[in-house]
Amino acid sequence: MMQNNLQPPTPTMQDMHIVAQDMKAFQSQFKLGKFGFDPKMPGHATEHTMIVRQQPRTAKKIGSGISLPFEVRQEMALMLDEHQCALTVALHQYNKHHGHSEGAEGFISLHLLLEEHIEQTTKHIDEVGERVARLGVVSTAHPVTQHELSYTKSRTGGQVFGSRLLAQ
């Protein structure tokens, strides 16, 4: 029987614990210390000996086209890169829930809402990435590194992923 009460359910203690975990992950700090080439971070090492490229999360010393000091550009870009990582983690969650939405009453409305979130988040990821590049920094592209740098975390089976993927 369909319920007439359309109020959202009252958050449980488990819901509050999950929110508290996300708040601890951010800690009002950006991960500015995680920059430069680190061969232990996924996506940083390369097997290509003939390709010379700027390493992820490093700023160009000259040639960015913006007349801000190097340190300022790097700090701004690292904050934006961390935000882009969080947006990408959110996008993966929206895509997952978009594909798994079900139910006779709310399927279409939920499906369309998640589709709108996917479109807007994709747009924001693109805009932030362009700003990071304009500041002369290469943004993070590897999914594991994005998750590590993100201030939001993916969930699977109620568990929070750490910097390593959990075997299921």
Image (cartoon, rainbow, N blue to C red):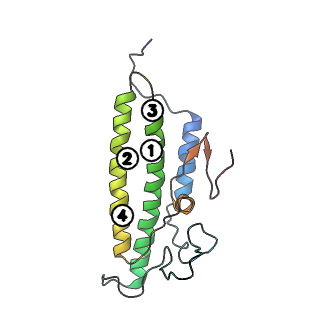
Look at label 1 and name its amino acid: Asn
Task: Report, in whole angstroms, how far the alpha carbon at label 1 lies from the one at label 3.
Answer: 10 Å
Q: Of discs 1 and 4, which sits in the foreground? A: 1
**Tag 4 secondary structure:** helix
Q: Are marks 2 and 4 in contact (CB under 8 Å)?
A: no
Task: Report, in whole angstroms, how far the alpha carbon at label 3 lies from the one at label 4.
Answer: 28 Å
Instruction: Look at the picture and state if 63 lies above or below 98.
Output: below
| Percent x, y of residue 29 | 50, 65
Q: Are marks 2 and 1 in contact (CB under 8 Å)?
A: yes
| Percent x, y of residue 72 | 39, 79
Of the numbered discs in the image, which one, if any, rests on residue 95?
A: 1
Furthest-front residue in this view: 50
**Tag 2 secondary structure:** helix
**Which one is nearer the viewer's eye here, 139 or 16?**
139
Q: Residue at x 46, y 56 (%)?
A: 86
* Quadrant housing residue 104: top left
Task: Determine which residue is flagged by label 2.
Answer: 118
Mark 4 packing: few (<14 Cα in 10 Å), some, or many (20+)?
A: some
Q: Residue at x 43, y 61 (%)?
A: 83
Q: Is residue 154 left or right of residue 115?
A: right
Task: Determine which residue is flagged by label 3.
Answer: 101
Quadrant of the rendering where the N terminus is positioned = top left
Of the numbered discs in the image, which one, if any, rests on residue 128?
A: 4
